[in-house]
Amino acid sequence: MLILLTGAKGFIGSRLLSRLYESGHKVKLVTRTTCECEFSGVEIVHADLTNPDTDFDFLLSGCDVVFNCAGEIHDEKLMRSLHVDATERLVAAASRLASEERPIHFVQLSSVGAYGPARGVARVVNEQTSENPQGVYEETKTIGDSRVAKNRSNAFFSYTILRPSNVFGQSMTNNSLRQLGRIVKKGLFFYIGSAKKDSVATYIHVDDVVSALMLCGFDRKAKGEIFNLSNDCALSDLIDGMADAQQVSHPKWSLPEAPLRLIVSIANRFLYLPVTQARIDALVARTSYPSTKLRDTLGFIPEREVPIAIGELFTQKPVV
């Protein structure tokens, strides 16, 4: 099969490229910048997906499956043009070519951010949960999903949308988990309120995301479906995993939530503190994203247990 891959230089896209190549697929990757590929035979196409003048028919010609992993996580001004407008043009061209040349299956990499946060309450999110994205990234990705899923009026175009939670792995550039690990190593971490007992950590290893993407791309049962993907665990298990990886004691202290929020609210007016209201929200979150539908439909079960795999962020070699 010929595969079109966008976002191949990114954290997830680069791992997916390796898996596609190892599986024997021909890959055409799209990049705006100079790109050297370690895999022989991969076709590199230089194109800007946000440019309306880009020849999308050329990009898609001969392709059987599209993996749309392109994403902008830093510059909010570029998010709509990439997540919404470029996706719309890519899907429209794929739908048209599918009816004219050959069937095309479109896999959209999205995010559970489509469902929005829930502060202070326990919540179980599944694929039927109402969408309520908060923030430019989440909003534009969710709109992009709707462009993929809307009726394309032909039987030759199909799609699957995969919404993972927080993706981690050794090659990730986001350092938030490593920063949290350093706090644990220094013995400065404390739980907030009942977090040690109740809080949920919603993470998924990048290798599991890639495995799920492969099923979404090549299993017929995935067509026309939206799947959530997370490998939730207790926050305390995640923190203990960080401590074990760095050979330090497990944190035990807890501070009451309400007084801490008040102190942080006042102190942050005058000082820069590593503790913010948003970080408190994350550390007391009780939302979970069961991957039941993905398991029942495609037989997928994550292989990388988060409390164990998290150790690779603090070692030179991936934890198997």
Image (cartoon, rainbow, N blue to C red):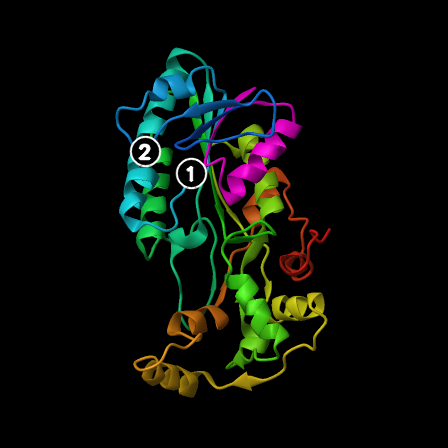
Q: CA distance from mark 2 to mark 1?
A: 10 Å
Q: Is residue 4 magenta?
A: yes
- In this rendering, the count of numbered labels is 2
Q: Is residue 138 above or below residue 45?
A: below
- From the viewer's side, name the closer residue of 300 and 92: 92
Residue drawn at (69%, 51%), measured in percent from left and top? Answer: 318
- From the viewer's side, name the closer residue of 299 and 234: 234
Q: Mark 2 packing: few (<14 Cα in 10 Å), some, or many (20+)? A: many
Q: Which quadrant is home to the N terminus? A: top right
Q: Is residue 139 left or right of residue 177?
A: left
Q: Is residue 249 left or right of residue 103?
A: right
**Circles 2 and 1 in contact, beta carbons < 8 Å:** yes
Residue at image mark 1: 70
Q: Position of residue 28 (x, y in %)?
A: 50, 23
Q: Is residue 155 visible?
A: no
Q: Position of residue 163 (x, y in %)?
A: 47, 46
Specify the amino acid type for callout 2. Answer: Ala
Q: Mark 1 packing: few (<14 Cα in 10 Å), some, or many (20+)? A: many
Residue at image mark 2: 86
Residue furthest to the top in view is: 101
- Element carrying mark 1: loop
Q: Is residue 166 magenta?
A: no
- From the viewer's side, name the closer residue of 227 and 165: 165
